Amino acid sequence: MNDLISTISFMFLDGIIWGFVIALIALGLSLIFGIMGIVNMAHGDIFMIGAVLALVLGGLLGSFWPALIVVPLLVGICALPVERWILRPYEGKPLTTMVATIGVSFIIQQVTLMVFGGEPHMVHEPIQFTIPLFGVAYSGYRVFAAVIGIVCIALLWLGLHRTSFGIYIRATMEQPEMADAIGINTSLIRAVTFGIGAGMAAFGGVLAAPIHKVFYLMGADVILFSFIVVIVGGLGNLAGTLVAALLLSGIEGVLCVFFEPINARVLILLLMALVVVFRPRGLFSA
Amino acid sequence: MSKMINSWSQMRYFKLLIIAVVLVGLILLGLFSASGFLSLLIIMIIYSIYALAYDLLLGYANQPSLGHSLFFGLGAYGMVLPVLHWEWGFWAALGMALLAGAVGGLVVGFLAVRVTEAYHVILTALIASVVFLLAKNATPLTGGSGGLSFNVPPVVFGPVKLSVYDPETNFFLVLAFGLAVYLFLRRLVGTPLGRIWVGIRENENRMVSLGYNVYYYKLAAFIAASMLTALAGALYAVRLRYVSAEFFDFMWSVLPFIWVIVGGIGTLAGPIVGVVLFTVFQIYVSDWWTHYLILFGVLILAVLRWAPKGVMGYVNNWLNTRNARVGDKHGGSSASHLKGY
């Protein structure tokens, strides 16, 4: 009995720790949708690009750490022109943005396949220590990744709520036309927010590189889960997104104790389907 | 002017003429082309059925499903399993496929029709991915990713028995289905039911106020689209003589969405144009470049940029402005007089 409880607690924690990576990706998705009405189907591929670049950079420099800063910046900057020159005309039309970002997603995937090849790679965990967790020697890197994830999310929250740029972003989210009218450069805000969202996905990718197999289709596993997290948390509700990411990953971990992983996935997806049917505005809506 | 230009009836005849030309062209191609090209045509017609079904749902009833691979796969398995296990004939198995699509549409639609927009997208994608995972896992029933091969029974028309292993027979069978679906939908969108769907698409709240039970009409569209999607899935399985859990793959939900948006949403010609564009592109470009999906992506972006309402939206727009100009020359149409005000 005690064993079972500690297994469940262990799997729940393990799920939550992965949940922080998911939360990073989903928050980026939610931000992009909230500001621009873009349903970003390429988000999983941006995550993948983050992981692949971490692998490449780690190989070049012999160290994993620079990637944590360089890759999100690089991806964020590359995302700016994509928003401005490719996606801007479709903003506010979710269906068209879906098709357009599917196009972008094809391009990212195939270019990655062309340049890096299709075989999965592993990235070694950059810190080799273990933490005893419910009687199991738990990978220290995973805990570290979760902590970095928390820091990043806290920075995002601070950025949105404690800086003037954050206020501009939130104003553009609430009332784009009014924000424009009072002199906020909404064009810049849109581009930068897209960059931040993409950077967060890439950051999630870098963090996930030592945990997840790195290959050009790895985004597909993550994208549906992130979308569901965004919907279950409530569209545009960033706090809801965070809670939903942690909760759903944690529950999936617990379900893995009792079922095969694939059945656990099926159950968690069904659970989310129920939430979408009965609480279509999100779990935490008033 | 003695010659009044009646652009509406002219457009109508123009469209009928195009349909006739395409049909005659297809029949001639079916009679005289090599089997490799025939097989491409067969695939395109099957995809067109799928795209038309999807456009009925998205373009007319305004329900952006991203889970139609579910019905595609159900149709394919509905066709294959009875033949494999109970040795059913062609028509009985096809009936089973349609039934599977209808029942699946009823069950999924029962839930999915309640929610709209992004929620509809996610819910349908969720349900389809659940079924995909289950189908991949249930190897004894579905064959998993490896799939099941089967021998297609002969197609019986009264005393005549036709074998789809003859490419020409397969082509004309699929063409007959394609034409039937096209004509059926062409008729359907003009009926009161079709107009109600358009009404729901344009202003759902208003239709509710007018006393229509919007839920049932949307559910009807969902079921009809699911059945036609199942038909496409069944024909595809017949064409390949094979079915696998990969028929439920997310890609099969994304493709019709791309075809319809790029071809021209809410038109009947648009989905077909989208299918032809992408399939020809896929076949010919993939021949000389493995990474043709890059150009696929560029093509999607280019079409969206230069023709935001899809290829047919662009063509219709062009025809309308041209008609308006012709109208001006012949004394002016009432609409162009009003433009200045």
Image (cartoon, rainbow, N blue to C red):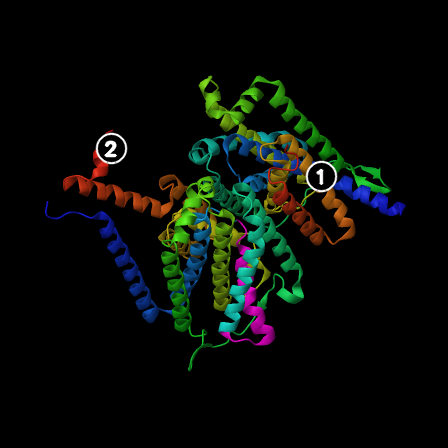
Counting from the top left corner in percent of width and height, residue A80 is at 50, 30
**Residue range (magenta):** B66-90
A148 or B141: which is nearer to us?
A: B141
Does the segment drawn in magenta span residue B83? yes
Q: Is residue A124 visible?
A: no
Q: Identify residue for label 1.
A: A247
Amino acid type, mark 1: Leu
Callout 1: helix, strand or loop? helix
Q: Residue furthest right?
A: A2
Please say if B227 is above or below A162: below
Q: Is residue A101 left or right of residue A242?
A: left
Q: Position of residue B212 (x, y in %)?
A: 46, 47
Q: Residue at x 61, y 61 (%)?
A: B145
Front position in the image: A124 or B122: B122
Using the rendered image, report if marks 2 and 1 lie on a common chain: no
When the figure is inspected, residue B315 is found, relative to residue B69, above or below; the finding is: above
Please give the chain letter of the residue carrying mark 2. B
Question: Tag on residue B339?
Answer: 2
Residue extending farthest to the bottom is B159
Quadrant into which the N terminus of chain B falls: top left
Report the amino acid beneath label 2: Lys
B160 up-or-down from A162: above or below: below
Secondary element type, mark 2: loop
Residue at the image position 45 percent from the left and 56 percent from the top: B53
Residue B253 numbered tag = none
